[in-house]
Image (tube, grey):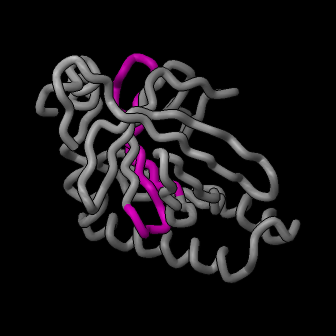
Amino acid sequence: MTSRPGRSLPRVTIHYLRPPDHLQTFRQPVIHRNPRVIVTFSRRIRVPSPMELDGEVVLETGSDIVWFTFPGLWHDIGRFHNARGAFTGFYANLLTPVEMLPGNIWRTTDLFLDVWMKPGQAPRLLDEDELRDALNADALEAGTARRAREEAEKILERASAGAWPPPVVHEWTRERALGVLDNPGGAG
């Protein structure tokens, strides 16, 4: 992605369906793009309640997230920060491969499972109960749920072997993302 001085960053509009019928729309600036990954930034998010894991707030209103979308993959990755800007961990959100439409419109469906990894700790699978509830309510097809579980297992195996998240996720820190937001014509 190249930007010219004085120009704002392109934005994507993400239509995010959580089955059966909860549709959310997010608009995020694109801070980096290449054929393998698109990096976007969620600045000072709002959440109904803080996300806590093991008694620690890992995401809250005012938090920033650097998002990594990999065309064709069944997950994206977020670098989560608390409202003070401290990095709290890596979050893989299992979802259908993002459909990228003309006009920077994206569509995807949440598949309930998530993987969380705090630096220096083992990865954990989250929200298995939510996936089970969605299956019991016929909000998700069994084959799609099976695909989500397979993807989660791949992530857990790679993370346990030290091969996840990929290098680009380590390269694009919150500070680097803020630098691109502050200077869209700069090199990022």
1 lies left or right of 70: left
In this view, which residue lies farthest toward the front?
A: 102
Residue in front for this viewpoint, 100 or 161:
100
Classify residue 146 as left or right of residue 32. Answer: right
> Residue 49 in the image: x percent, y percent?
67, 27
Residue placed at 33% from the left, 44% from the top? 39
Q: For the point 31% across and 46% down, which residue is it?
A: 119
Query: Can you say which quadrant of the picture contains the C terminus?
Result: top left
Residue placed at 51% from the left, 31% from the top?
59
The answer to whether residue 149 is above or below residue 2 is: below
Tag count in the figure?
0
Query: Residue 186, relative to residue 119: is it above or below?
Result: above
Which of 53 and 131 lies nearest the eye of the viewer? 131
Residue at x 41% of width, y 45% of height: 78
Residue at the left extreme of this rendering: 187
Which of 136 and 156 lies nearest the eye of the viewer? 136
Q: Quarter of the image holding residue 175?
A: top left
Residue 105 spot, x, y in % from top left: 52, 47
Which residue, as the protein is rendered here, is positioned at the far right? Answer: 137
Residue 72 included in the magenta stretch of the image: yes
Main SS class of the magenta portion in the image: strand
Position in image of residue 136 (x %, y %):
85, 70
- The magenta segment: 71-93
Q: Quadrant of residue 11?
A: top left
- In the displayed structure image, the side of residue 152 where residue 134 appears, left or right: right
- Is-magenta flag for residue 127? no
Task: List x then y, in percent, for residue 122.
Answer: 38, 58
- Quadrant into which the N terminus falls: top left
